[in-house]
Amino acid sequence: MVLSKACTYGILASLFIARESAKSKGYVSIGKMSKELHISFHFLTKILQELTSAGLLVSMKGPKGGVALKRDAGEITILDVVLAIDGIKVFRECLLGLPGCGDEKPCPVHDEWAEIREELYQTFQSKTLGETAQKIDELNLRFALPELYER
Amino acid sequence: MVLSKACTYGILASLFIARESAKSKGYVSIGKMSKELHISFHFLTKILQELTSAGLLVSMKGPKGGVALKRDAGEITILDVVLAIDGIKVFRECLLGLPGCGDEKPCPVHDEWAEIREELYQTFQSKTLGETAQKIDELNLRFALPELYER
DNA sequence: AGAATATAAGACACTCAGCTCTGAATTAAA
DNA sequence: TTTAATTCAGAGCTGAGTGTCTTATATTCT
């Protein structure tokens, strides 16, 4: 697993919010989201709290409350979500887990892994929530867990 | 973490054995290896047992015993070690952890991730223990944990 | 308008599972 | 008899997921 479960759920939820906000303004209910994405409500809440405190989302309590994107969906990238939840270490860690591995004292696969990591970074950076959400609708892509995984 | 700890330790130990067997014939003691690589003896033992039962190593009990490569160091790739310990799933899993993700019903980052995974596979496949061990000596590369991490 | 109520986020402590790591007893070879 | 791998049982830790209670706010009712 490159990304933590929390991080993948965070990405899926962000895309969900982006799709909803393209359809109608206002806040998206976490309860509704957890049902549709088949993600545990409390766990999802915790993840969205992190995204809120990272400044990617805004939240509102009470009836008609929920969460919404703070900036325009075209202004937020998947990378932003990954960094908010898993942090930069995903793109820094040595493949062999060697603590001192770096350009000065590389491990045997350092250069190759650095390249691959960089590609991953670019991939995430190049994808905004807006574009990706649109692509999901157009191509009918998978982006929720199957019911099998519901709790 | 792309690879499990056990897997990275397995790679490091395999490279250690390849280096030793380039210098002298015979078995490499697990005890000695665990000291030099700063990996817990019992944990390392378990990992090497997996490599032995996977047919990559042979083991011998008693004095002068230990483990040795079953085939020539140039005939074993890092990929072999990864497959023996973490299995093929490393190179199959969806980046977003979506169970049904595949070419028919891809997730939003499916294609990009498939490419990156493939590169990683090729990288591991192209590196034999022999070459890599030689490179370590020539370039004085890092391949053991620092003492700080000793147990 | 003001109070009551329902809804939903937020905080926190907890369980559970899987991976990591340890210890003690066993077995085989020199 | 010593040395070193093997086996197995289980402890410890971390990340994943759950339950309960608290806090905030929009809506509804008087």
Image: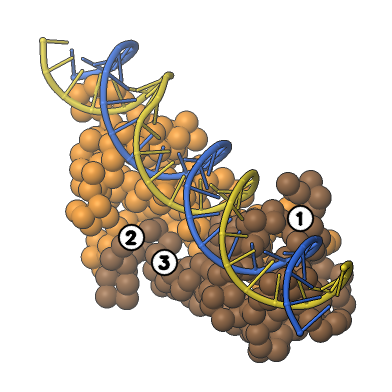
Chain colours: A brown, B orange, C blue, D yellow
Spot occupied by residue A135 in the image (x, y as percentages of width and height): 81, 78
Q: Secondary structure at mark 1?
A: loop
Q: Secondary structure at mark 3?
A: loop
Left or right of B124, for residue B45: left
Label 2 vs label 3: CA separation? 8 Å
Answer yes or no: is residue B89 visible.
yes
- Mark 1 or 3, which is nearer the eye? 1
Protein chain holding label 3 = A
Spot occupied by residue A18 in the image (x, y as percentages of width and height): 75, 78
Q: Amino acid at mark 1?
A: His
The verdict on a common chain for dots 2 and 3 is yes
Q: Quadrant of the C terminus of chain B?
A: top left
- In the figure, B85 relative to A12: above or below? above
C15, A130: nearer the viewer:
C15
Residue at image coords 79%, 81% = A26
Look at the numbered discs 1 and 3 and tell me whether their residues touch, using CB distance below 8 Å. no
- In the figure, B67 relative to B130: above or below? above
Residue with the mark numbered 2: A98
Residue with the mark numbered 3: A93
Reading the chain from its start, which is encountered first: label 2 or label 3?
3
C13, A35: nearer the viewer:
C13
The image's mark for residue A69 is none
Protein chain holding label 1 = A
Residue with the mark numbered 1: A38
Label 1 vs label 3: CA separation? 31 Å
B96, B141: nearer the viewer:
B96
Reading the chain from its start, which is encountered first: label 1 or label 3?
1
So how many labels did they put on this image? Answer: 3
